[in-house]
Image: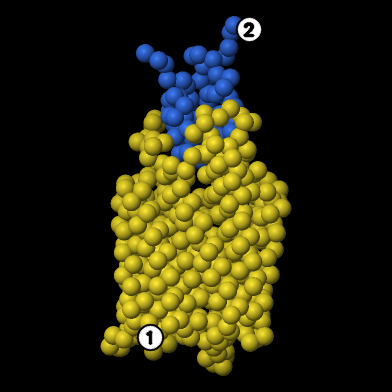
Chain colours: A blue, B yellow
Amino acid sequence: MANHPEEILIDARWLEPPEPMEKVLHTLALLHSGQTIRLLLHREPFPLYLILREKGYAHETMPQPDGSYVILIRRVSAE
Amino acid sequence: MNSQPGLSFEQAPPFHQPLRFFLTAPLFLLVAGVLLAMESGGLNSRWSAGALALTHALTLGFLAMVMLGALMQILPVVAGSTLPASRTVAMVSHAALTLGTTFLMTGFLRSSPVALGSGIVLLLTGFMVFIAAATISLMRVAGSDTVRGMRHALASLALTVLLGGLLALIRAGWENPPMIEGASTAHAGFGLLGWILLLVAGVAYQVVPMFQITPPYPLLLRRWLTGVLFVLLLLRALVPLHAAPAVFVIDACLAAGMLMFAFVTLRLQSQRRRKLPDITLDYWRTGMTSLIACVAVWLPAQCWPAWAKSDARPLLLGVLFLYGFAASVVTGMLYKIVPFLAWFHLQAQHQAKAGTIPNMKQMITERKMRLQFRVHLAALLLLVAAVAWPNVLHIHAGIAVALSSLLLLSNMFAALRLYLKHGGRMS
């Protein structure tokens, strides 16, 4: 099982806080190097950004036309 | 597309900053309950020393205390912007609000100009420091509907505090200027319908859909409600009180805005995606029902002069608005904010793996929150009844308010105990 998909999708739209954050934190523990989390959310998760930065992950936020957000999360590579 | 906005964990307020506001607030509710139980004066006339002390224990000591602490926390969450010098602002505004409210209440109860004056200086200092910091913070962010609501609420707070200062100086012995009745009406209008209602509305646009998973508030309402209500309040303050038709039209528009907000909120909550029991939802429904009841109490006074002149009418409005609406919504929010912060800070501090720290719902048990909600409801009903029979029921109502505040405090401490037990740090 060496091949991991490049992206793990988390659809956390319409979940009650902090369930989306809990799902992301669960998944971070399973993330392999080079993998990205694609988080779908109905609002922008400012508190999650703080925890991601604290734990050494980078994120990229893309607002969607329907008012929801796509957030890509990856580990900051140690250079 | 945006990545890594300029906010780091170090900039987010540490847990102790909002918590000190949240733990102090129930103590003022306790004081209000004890004062009410000790004497019926607070429910005999809105102008009595007892009523003024009680009102300000509730508005400053409980409501403003929680609202300032919550704003400090909510700004980074909903707008991605922290208060500048947040530690100093939290320390100064908390100390000034706590001491200032205590002095002001003492000034009312003992008719002491020195205590009133000290209270006013402290309150003006504390509020102005907070308002300046929050204004800077709100200028940095894009003007969303919530941010607009917060700006209108803060402007109303500034006007309330300035008018309150003027009124207290007059009570402390300064010469009574003309338009004193107008200043006092405007003070109450900006305080209740401006600061409290507009802040609740602005925050509701975010937290009702967020926590109760409802559809969003209608776009037109989000865009216009707080601005229109704020302009109406300005007009109400400028129109002479004897211009009865104009006053009636403005009041009717304000009442319509209140009804619209309350009914839309109740309708959205009935459309929530998850139908699980939720104490915050119950608190919000109590709050919105009380807001509707306020209009039901106000309306008959327009065609029934005896009710308009009755001492009971403003007291009943005060009980329904401050305890039924504002205290209910604020308590309901505390039950989301405190468990979330305890969970969030543990999570961030410990790089915790799933399952090693309590989840948000375990921070305060549903059973304890439900018990406190029932006592709060009983206190509200007793307060309403005590407006009609103050000499008979003030003791029961006061004890119920005090008991509700003690249970609320104990619930806040339950979350704090669990946080500390799992190694949470306070700074």
* Element at label 1: helix
Q: Residue at x 38, y 68 (%)?
A: B100
Amino acid type at circle 2 is: Met
| Residue B383 visible in the shown view | no
Q: Could you tell me residue B67's position as x and y percent?
A: 46, 59
Q: Is the residue marked by circle 2 packed among few (<14), some (14-19), or many (20+) residues within 10 Å?
A: few
**Occupied quadrant, residue B245:** bottom left
Per the model, the C-alpha gap separating discs 1 and 2 is 79 Å
Amino acid type at circle 1 is: Glu
| Residue B6 visible in the shown view | yes
Chain ID at mark 1: B
Q: Could you tell me residue B330's position as x and y percent?
A: 54, 60
Q: Residue at x 58, y 27 (%)?
A: B353
Mark number, residue A1: 2
- Residues tagged by mark 1 and mark 2 found on one chain of the structure: no
Q: Is residue A5 shown above or below B11? A: above
Q: Could you tell me residue B262's position as x and y percent?
A: 57, 64
Chain ID at mark 2: A
Q: Is residue B212 left or right of residue B231?
A: right
Between B349 and B195, the one nearer to me in the picture: B349
For label 1, the residue is: B181
Q: Is the residue marked by circle 1 packed among few (<14), some (14-19), or many (20+) residues within 10 Å?
A: few
Q: Residue at x 34, y 62 (%)?
A: B126
**Occupied quadrant, residue B169:** bottom left
Q: In which quadrant is the N terminus of chain B drawn?
A: top left
* Element at label 2: loop
Residues under numbered marks 1 and 2 in contact, where contact means CB atoms less than 8 Å apart: no
